[in-house]
Image: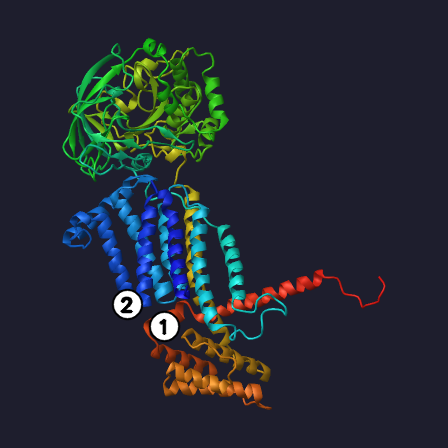
Amino acid sequence: MSGRARLAICAWVATLMASCAMLPLVSPATWIIQAAFMLAIQTGVGAATRRVPLARPLTVAAQALVTLLMLTLVFAHAQALAGFVPGPEAFQHFADLLREGSDDVSRYAIPAPLHDGIRLMLIGGVLVVGLAVDTLAVTFRSAAPAGLPLLALYSVAAGLSESGVSWLWFLLAAGGYLMLLLAEGRDRLAQWGRVFGGAPRTTPGSESSGPLAPVRTGRRIGAVAVAIALLPLPTISGGLLDAAGTGVGAGTGSGGTISAVNPLVSLRDSLNVDENRQVLSVDTSTTDLSDMYLRIVSLDDFDGTTWKPSQRHIEGVPNQFPTPTGLGADVKRSKILTKISAADWYAQDWLPMPYPPSHVSIDGSWRYEPVGMTVVGDHGQNTRGVTYTVTSLDVEPTAEQLASAPEPSSALRNQYTKVPKSLPAVVAETARKVTAGSTSHYEQAVKLQDYFAVTGGFQYDTQVDVGTGRDAIAKFLKDKQGFCVHFSFAMAAMARTLGIPARVAVGFAPGTPEADGTVSVGLKDAHAWPELYFEGVGWTRFEPTPNRGSVPAYTQSTVPGSDVPDPARPSASTSAEPSAAPSASESCTAQLRKLEGCASQAPAIAAGGDPRGPWWYVQIVALGLGALLLLTIPFSPMLWRTRMRSVRLGAHGRTESEAAVHTLAVWEELTDTAWDFGIPPDESLTPRKAAARMVRLGELDPAAAASVHRVADAVEQVLYAPRPQLASGLAQDVRRVAVGFQDTSGRSARLRALVAPRSTVRVVWALSAWWTSVTTRAAAFRLPPRKPSGQQG
């Protein structure tokens, strides 16, 4: 196999290794197989055209054309001529897919579903990067700058990652790049041999004296460099896919999936605003506004750190919603008709609705998720400026019905009582301690609610940092300060440890009544609350957060002296009379905050604290330093070469010996400059013959040729004359020669000489010589001295 073919294979492997960093972003990860196959075809086309041979631009054009035909065949065959020749309709389809993929990126959480738009972005991106790597490393023989597109591929995965980029993906990407560099270095050394390295670099009797010694040393250096780079590698957290909305699968309304997202980002952003802007205007037929919660989505997947929705199957919105799961016929209920108008700036993918809904009348493209009984926009549909009508049920269970509820089915219990092993033991211990003596799950639930809202000494504080990660709930139970998210997360987790099916709902607490009879729901009304399941009643709302929302009538406290708000009366935030006084968000002072009299503010994601704390800046700085470190890797040959040129062409020295050293350094810089432009040094030639060779092969103009000969004459004076006459202006001569090489070289040769200079192989040789000397001295130190024959011990 030729060296160029080996280099092409290495470029293919390096691109795939860097692409692996994107595997956690989508599910399933089968796209990597398709990308590998198409990338192999692209690489094979490049190898075939180079073997013909075609001109370099034609080789790149052939690979780009085949790439376009493959993408057309896979993603737009129905719109293409003969199934693979792209036309106007195919390009329009590509644009539509890319637009859909961009929308999916902004709405799905990791791992996002592998829709066609995202799949086109992934595979197309890998093929574009693969073409760039193959062009630079193989077609133009410049492996060093090929690290830039590989770095771009890894950086995209790092930026989109939700929980941080694993060191494994960095190791794969860096290993692929080093493999590419070593393959190119081995190919160059195999052609040049060792005649340019000066003195021998192996000891007598060593196993090799060929060009593989520097390659072996390069492998060692690369392994050490990757190991060192892994030590300060920053964790890149907070992915671009972690957005406020959700998305759904493609289709006409008969299938697809809705993937896990984190709606708490939207909740956090809403509560962070200074102005309590109106989000929804609600006109409802109920007279009890205290229970008018507008539910957006339920979070039922708990990993010990946060709650999020599970990936669900979705379908077309039915004309009549089915009866909610678990709701028995003997539970009192009544129908409520609610008309909701969303502000023209409020773009939410989910539809806020009273729970449980039984009918929705709305225009637009919407889908239905039956497990959570939620309605979600399809293909970019959102709530911006829409008006819709919801028929819902006002379910009024009694305490006796909840207390006598039988055990739910094993399937439901297994799904909604699951807690991870990483959950701190104090959570379950506190739950058992708080509910000690209870005779039913209902009594346990009421005691948990009272513990948070009344008896436990918890405070609703919008300024406290209660921590993040799997210990956040334990810290919240210890510090007893937090937001609505923390209260709902903690109660739902504790309920699950007691065997009570639980999940968390996100939406809006009851808003503020207006003079015209409508209810204004603002950004500050964003809220989260736990829902617990009781067989015969279904999913039931609880309110553990102090001073927020209203406590349901069926959970009235049985604790003597309890000051739980009267459930028959709206809470302060839902007064039955319109108020002319400024809202709490507008007049909240430090004294009011201490008295818990302010409207809610930003609950952090996953029971975390304020995300704008000092650690946010530390992470940004660390990320910037890490990116800067990664960017210096592909430019290290150019930086080393610039440094050496500055040292060699520096001050002349004042003594005769210093001037002689400077002359030899200038000559070495001249030969390395010629080497960078494709004229390797030949140490068997005298300086005069070497100068003539540079002038001939470099096709230098007379001025540059004269400069070369002046430097060669100065070197011969230093080497051979008894009393050398030291010349001046040699550094300027070398710079003039460098300009001459640039004038006679093509653009690719100039780029190669700048970014990936060939003379940097001297670093490998120098390190190889150093390592050989170190191992030789170590071996001599370990061996005992040999005694003359006949000498007694």
- Indicate the position of residue 331 as horizontal and vertical percent values: 26, 11
Residue in the image at 36% along x and 57% along y: 149
Image-based side of 765 in relation to 137, left or right? right
Q: How many marks?
A: 2
Q: Secondary structure at mark 1?
A: helix
The residues tagged by marks 2 and 1 sit, at their Cα atoms, a distance apart of 14 Å
Residue in the image at 70% along x and 62% along y: 781
Q: Is residue 766 above or below residue 82?
A: below
Q: Nearer the viewer, residue 587 or 445?
A: 445
Q: Residues within 10 Å of mark 1 (few under 14, many from 20)?
A: many
- Tell which circle, 2 or 1, labels the residue nearer the N-terminal end: 2
Residue in the image at 26% along x and 62% along y: 62
Residue type at mark 1 is Ala
Quarter holding the C terminus is bottom right
Q: Which residue is mark 1?
A: 749
Q: Is residue 612 above or below residue 688?
A: above
The reply to whether residue 632 is visible in this rendering is: no
- Indicate the position of residue 517 as horizontal and vertical percent values: 16, 23
Q: Nearer the viewer, residue 499 or 121?
A: 121
Q: Hey, which residue is sitting farthest right in the picture?
A: 792
State which quadrant residue 529 falls in. top left
The reply to whether residue 101 is visible in this rendering is: yes
State which quadrant residue 383 falls in. top left
- Indicate the position of residue 186 as horizontal and vertical percent values: 47, 65
Q: Which residue is mark 2?
A: 57
